[in-house]
């Protein structure tokens, strides 16, 4: 198969799987989505092996009603997309497999007794939409898939149809859509001024317009990636079923936001230091706001949501350091995408397993979980140390890159950024260690008394993610090496 | 065989062993033996490598094992004599501690060893990495890996809140230190573009010329990181909690070896990276100050402890104080008095080795007592020497060693420390004061261990202990104790050999041009030490002479005793005719040194201060509610915006009255407005 057809099938498979699995009932309704997601992962790996470390851009059509338009439909697979594709499909498989057990009547938190066809429809469509976002060769096509992810996340967040869930889904749509409006304006301005939708067209703009367009794109990224001042939708989105939260945080939706910013920065070396400073400043500010919110959270999932916000700020900080002249920082930011995916995916799935077995996600209700659920407890602690950055686990490596990048930028700004990042890292470390000890160690609380480790469909994804918490940087390094060489 | 391959092999073996012990954890003893065999093979391999290094010089890896794209850093291995010295220490103590654990871990009936042996092996692997890499970044990687593994071991009894608090304190405080070191290394990286040790050294040298203020910042950050690990006060407040919390085998490694990693780091930074200059002098004095503080406060606090392992933990702080004092003195004399400086640095290293032996042994002794009696409270113990003779004998050896009595090992190192600080102190009065304080503290140490021995092994045996039916610990726990006790003696009676090894180790840390020759420092007699600190001999110590005199004196006394033939009467103690249970009339740990305790117990306002080491009760953190309100963006942004839109929409809906005529009117008005605008635009164009 040629690479173009592989990519085409790759894009279609999840969508097809979504449609096929909707009417299914019983056991097959779990098997077919899992197969579809595994097929997507296999195709992704095959495509990446064929392409990497080159870049493939393939256009197959244009929209006739756009006058004088360039090619707007096609695929692109470069190292950055490859990394995203691996994260999206890899976490996708684990989440789908995990869902088969989590979305069942045995779940003590939210027993699911009805058919799950619509759930898998939205989940697989989500995977497809995210794949579409990251293999789009231009901003217009990206925007189309971008909005698809918004719809999918709305449907999945509101999945339980409870009042809270409906409100949360609505809020997520509104807030991310505000961002999308900015993105749309940016794309229109870009097209009108340059006649192109491509990522590197920003460099063709006059400097003032370029800055304005970039800031609009940034705003879109901030909204999607749950950064200040848009981040409030993400903690509320916790009313989604936990596998969806895991997917939303680790691989999809919020990662689309950072991907967009990273993509535009990577394609345009002409961005000025001022916008770099804006991005860096907002990233560090968001980080500190998010870390301050840790102390008020009693719901484990909400705590993890704020941790996601802070970690996406790390990615954006890394990207901004790239604008400010530190290649190390940019590489660290990109590496953090995959490292964070492994750690945060694991954390969410562990919290889901706890909710599944105990019916509670409240920090104050839970204690001594590791005694009753050793695999889940160990998994959470691994994910926790991965996220706070303890070697040899994943986020340590990328955080160190970003810290080094900040000091590499030098001057007062670089040093200040570095010190603030170190401070955030320390506070997050302390709080997570505290929460981890409180929930997983200590004596067994009444809620946990009857809990046991769930069946294989939940534990196997956890074990895979534990392994990934160690090997994720090994996957990321060759990719960021190519990205760094191209900068 | 290529020593590098042997080294990599033993590291891989440790990691493989960690995985295997996970799988065998259903059987605690089997797991213990697997871990011991793995440790044994790895240790033999590492001893071979260390021997090669001492005989033929450093081993350097030609090819980096791992290269990090974008960070200009690679995993390179360099084993010089300094690394080899620490490698031997790590593996020797860890091997004995693992053997000791085989039976000791049966003490914890409700906890699985799956959280013990794998982490123990990983911990040793981490320490091994710390002392063998020659790249700062990977130094950090192994450093934190070591901390992570040791944290898991400290919280082994994970259901006890005290243990969890200790674990948190330990990991958090050492993490602060590590981040400080990150920043220091990154600043140097920024100037040199590499994390290799040579780049770090070059960076410091360059900055010393261009920006000495920044060098002080960097050194301070490195010092905080290493001193936190080495548990120098005030950074080492984690130690008195963490060491007692861990299982005894781990306490032995933590106290015997792991805190020495801080010393290793300090030596690398301050001896190898920092060129000899006035900065060396200043930082030597600073390190000596922290050393003096630690030895003074640590040991005096140990005097009033009533928990055996906590008592030992405070002595670890005190003994690290000796090491830091020696290293500080050595550094500060480096630019002016190379002979004194060399002896001081060697004395510091000597004390590192000695402390590893006797403190590990003491923790194993305390563990043995706990294994049999189930308690660490000295108040409840007593008279165990009759029941556990070997443990008692080895504890006595260790106690005499730590107190610095000849012919045991710490006598030599302490003697050298006193010599250098006091003789060198003629030029630096502060160090003279510290030296005298160290002599005094040595006496305090003896007093403290009289208490330790007197309350646990000697004296009346409480009824409770009698009722337990105790015998000495099993062979796997006896052997490590006996080996360590023998080592305490051996290192004391063969000082010249030890000094030779330490001299080589120090020489490899970039000081070879400063060091006077070994023979000019310690004389030519291989069974004695003829110390010369500058011109002429300033001291001499021959352990054999001491031993011979000692033996002769004992013989004479014994002969007189035998010859006199006086009858020995063994009777019950007389309590003035009253009947008392032994428990009641026993001299308890609590009663020791009461005048001293009273002297340091006072009130400042509301705060009761007991001893030098005030227990700080951390207030429960309650973040201000105002912060939450201030950060509640929903309240500030989302809801006002949403309600604004709702209000506007409602206003707009007011226009929709449902009467067709009104709509037509609006339409005509709109059309009119549009026409006007268009016409005026056309006119303008």
Image: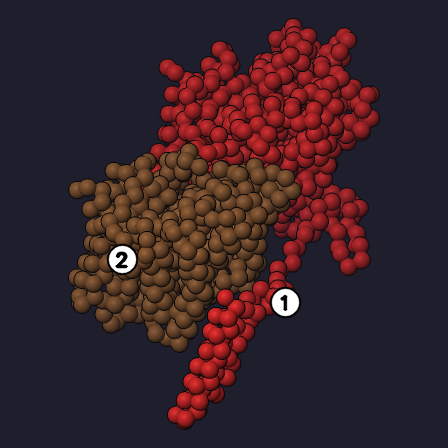
Chain colours: A brown, B red
Name the image quarter holding residue B317.
Answer: top right
Q: Is residue B291 visible?
A: no
**Where residue B384 appears, x then y in whole percent?**
56, 39
| Label 2 crowd bin: few (<14), some (14–19), many (20+), radius 10 Å | few
Q: Is residue A12 visible?
A: yes
Could you give the CA–CA distance between mark 1 and mark 2, rounded to whole angstroms?
57 Å
Q: Are marks 1 and 2 in contact (CB under 8 Å)?
A: no
Above/below status of A77 relative to B567: below
> Which residue is depicted at the point 40% across and 76% down?
A163
- To which residue does mark 2 refer? A64
> Which residue is depicted at the point 50% across and 84% down?
B651
The quadrant of the image that shows the N terminus of chain B is top left
Q: Dot 2: what SS?
A: loop
Task: Kindly identify which chain the residue marked by label 2 belongs to.
Answer: A
| Label 1 crowd bin: few (<14), some (14–19), many (20+), radius 10 Å | few
Can you tell which mark lies on residue A459?
Answer: none
Q: Dot 1: what SS?
A: helix
> Which residue is depicted at the point 62% across and 60% down?
B620
Q: Is residue A267 left or right of residue A410?
A: left
Q: Is residue B120 left or right of residue A229?
A: left
**Where residue A288 appears, x then y in whole percent?**
57, 55
Task: Kindly identify which chain the residue marked by label 1 belongs to.
Answer: B
Can you tell which mark lies on residue B626?
Answer: 1
**Where residue B153 appears, x then y in whole percent?**
48, 43
Above/below status of B500 relative to B207: above
**Where residue A108 appears, x then y in whole percent?**
34, 68
């Amino acid at each position: 198969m040629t690479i173009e057809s592989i990519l085409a099938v790759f894009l279609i498979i999840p969508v097809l799987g979504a449609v096929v699995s909707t009417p299914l009932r019983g056991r097959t309704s779990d098997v077919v989505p899992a197969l579809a997601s595994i097929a997507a992962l296999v195709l992704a790996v095959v495509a990446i092996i064929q392409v990497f470390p080159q870049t493939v851009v393939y256009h197959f059509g244009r929209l006739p009603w756009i006058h004088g338009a360039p090619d707007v439909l096609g695929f692109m697979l470069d190292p950055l997309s490859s990394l995203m594709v691996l994260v999206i499909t890899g976490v996708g498989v684990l989440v789908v497999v995990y869902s088969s057990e989590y979305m069942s009547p045995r779940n003590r938190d939210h027993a699911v007794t009805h058919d799950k066809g619509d759930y898998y429809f939205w989940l697989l469509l989500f995977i497809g939409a995210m794949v579409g976002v990251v293999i789009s060769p231009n901003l217009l096509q990206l925007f189309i898939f971008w909005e698809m992810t918004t719809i999918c996340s709305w449907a999945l967040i509101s999945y339980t149809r409870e009042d809270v869930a409906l409100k949360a889904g609505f809020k997520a749509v509104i807030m991310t859509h505000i961002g999308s409006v900015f993105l749309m304006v940016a794309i229109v301005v870009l097209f009108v001024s340059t006649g192109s939708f491509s990522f590197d067209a920003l460099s063709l703009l006059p400097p003032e317009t370029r800055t304005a367009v970039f800031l609009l794109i940034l705003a879109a990224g901030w909204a999607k990636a749950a950064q200040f001042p848009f981040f409030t939708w993400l903690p509320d989105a916790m009313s989604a079923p936990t596998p969806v939260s895991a997917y939303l945080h680790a691989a999809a939706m919020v990662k689309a936001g950072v991907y967009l910013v990273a993509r535009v920065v990577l394609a345009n070396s002409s961005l000025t230091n001022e916008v770099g400073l804006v991005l860096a400043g907002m990233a560090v500010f968001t980080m500190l706001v998010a870390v301050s919110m840790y102390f008020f959270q009693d719901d484990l999932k909400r705590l993890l949501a704020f941790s996601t916000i802070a970690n996406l700020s790390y990615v954006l900080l890394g990207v901004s350091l790239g604008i400010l002249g530190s290649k190390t920082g940019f590489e660290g930011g990109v590496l953090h995408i995959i490292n964070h995916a492994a750690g945060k995916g694991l954390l969410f799935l562990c919290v889901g397993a706890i909710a599944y077995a105990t019916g509670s996600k409240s920090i104050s209700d839970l204690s001594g979980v590791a005694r009753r659920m050793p695999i889940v407890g160990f998994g959470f602690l691994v994910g926790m140390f991965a996220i706070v950055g303890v070697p040899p686990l994943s986020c340590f490596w990328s955080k160190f890159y970003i810290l080094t990048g900040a000091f590499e930028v030098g001057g007062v700004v670089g040093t200040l950024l570095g010190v603030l990042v170190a401070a955030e890292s320390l506070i997050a470390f302390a709080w997570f260690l505290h929460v981890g000890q409180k929930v997983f160690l200590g004596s067994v609380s009444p809620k946990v008394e009857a809990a046991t480790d769930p069946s294989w469909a939940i534990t196997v994804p956890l074990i895979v993610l534990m392994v990934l918490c160690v090997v994720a940087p090994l996957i990321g390094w060759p990719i960021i090496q190519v990205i760094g060489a191209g900068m | 065989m290529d020593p590098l391959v042997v080294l990599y092999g033993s590291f891989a073996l440790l990691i493989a062993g960690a995985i295997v012990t996970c799988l065998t954890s259903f059987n605690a003893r089997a797991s213990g033996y697997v871990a011991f065999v793995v440790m044994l093979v790895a240790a033999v391999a590492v001893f071979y490598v260390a021997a090669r290094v001492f005989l033929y010089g450093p081993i350097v890896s030609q090819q980096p094992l791992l290269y990090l794209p974008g960070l200009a850093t690679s995993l390179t291995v360099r084993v010089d004599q300094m690394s080899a010295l620490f490698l031997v220490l790590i593996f020797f103590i860890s091997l004995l501690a693992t053997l000791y654990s085989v039976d000791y871990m049966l003490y914890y009936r409700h906890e699985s060893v799956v959280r013990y042996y794998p982490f123990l092996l990983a911990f040793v692997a981490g320490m091994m990495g710390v002392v063998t890499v020659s790249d700062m970044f990977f130094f950090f990687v192994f450093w934190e890996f070591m901390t992570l593994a040791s944290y898991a071991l400290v919280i082994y009894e994970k259901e006890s809140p005290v243990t969890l608090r200790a674990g948190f304190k330990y990991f958090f405080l050492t993490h602060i230190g590590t981040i400080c070191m990150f920043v220091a290394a990154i600043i140097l990286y920024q100037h040199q573009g590499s994390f290799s040790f040579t780049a770090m050294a070059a960076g410091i040298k360059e900055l010393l010329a261009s920006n000495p203020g920044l060098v002080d910042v960097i050194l301070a950050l490195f010092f905080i990181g290493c001193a936190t690990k080495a548990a120098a006060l005030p950074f080492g407040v984690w130690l008195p909690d963490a060491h007692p919390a861990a299982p005894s085998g781990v306490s032995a490694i933590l106290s015997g070896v792991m805190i020495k990693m801080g010393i290793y780091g300090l030596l690398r930074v301050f001896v190898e990276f920092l060129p000899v200059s006035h900065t060396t002098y200043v930082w030597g004095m600073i390190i000596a100050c922290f050393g003096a503080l630690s030895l003074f406060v640590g040991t005096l606090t140990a005097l009033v402890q009533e928990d055996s392992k906590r008592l030992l933990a405070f002595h670890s702080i005190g003994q690290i104080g000796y090491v830091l004092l020696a290293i500080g003195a050595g550094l500060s004399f480096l630019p002016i008095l190379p002979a004194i400086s060399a002896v001081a640095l060697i004395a510091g290293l000597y004390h590192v080795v000695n402390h590893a032996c006797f403190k590990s042994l003491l923790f194993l002794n305390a563990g043995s007592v706990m294994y049999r009696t189930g308690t660490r409270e000295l108040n409840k113990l007593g008279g165990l020497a009759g029941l556990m003779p070997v443990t008692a004998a080895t504890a006595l050896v260790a106690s005499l060693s730590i107190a610095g009595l000849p012919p045991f090992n710490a006598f030599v190192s302490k003697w050298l420390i006193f010599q250098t600080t006091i003789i060198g102190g003629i030029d630096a009065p502060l160090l003279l004061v510290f030296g005298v304080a160290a002599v005094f503290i040595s006496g305090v140490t003896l007093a403290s261990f009289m208490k330790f021995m007197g309350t646990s092994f000697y004296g009346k045996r409480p009824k409770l202990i009698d009722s337990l039916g105790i015998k000495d610990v099993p062979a796997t726990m006896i052997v490590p104790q006996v080996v360590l006790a023998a080592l305490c003696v051996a290192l004391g009676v063969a000082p010249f050999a030890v000094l030779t090894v330490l001299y080589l180790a120090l020489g490899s840390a970039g000081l070879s041009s400063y060091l006077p020759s070994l023979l000019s420092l310690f004389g030519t007699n291989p069974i004695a030490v003829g110390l010369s600190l500058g011109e002429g001999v300033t001291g001499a110590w021959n352990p054999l002479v001491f031993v011979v005199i000692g033996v002769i004196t004992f013989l004479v006394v014994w002969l007189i005793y035998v010859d006199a033939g006086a009858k020995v009467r063994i009777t019950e103690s007389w309590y003035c005719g009253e009947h008392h249970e032994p428990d009641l009339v026993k001299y308890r740990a609590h009663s020791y040194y009461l005048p001293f305790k009273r002297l340091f117990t006072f009130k400042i306002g509301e705060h009761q201060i007991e001893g030098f080491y005030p227990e700080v009760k951390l207030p429960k953190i309650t973040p201000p509610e105002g912060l939450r309100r201030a950060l509640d963006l929903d309240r500030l942004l989302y809801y006002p915006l949403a309600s604004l839109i709702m209000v506007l929409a409602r206003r707009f809906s007011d226009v929709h009255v449902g009467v067709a005529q009104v709509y037509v009117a609006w339409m005509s008005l709109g059309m009119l407005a549009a026409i006007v605008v268009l016409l005026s635009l056309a006119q303008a164009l």
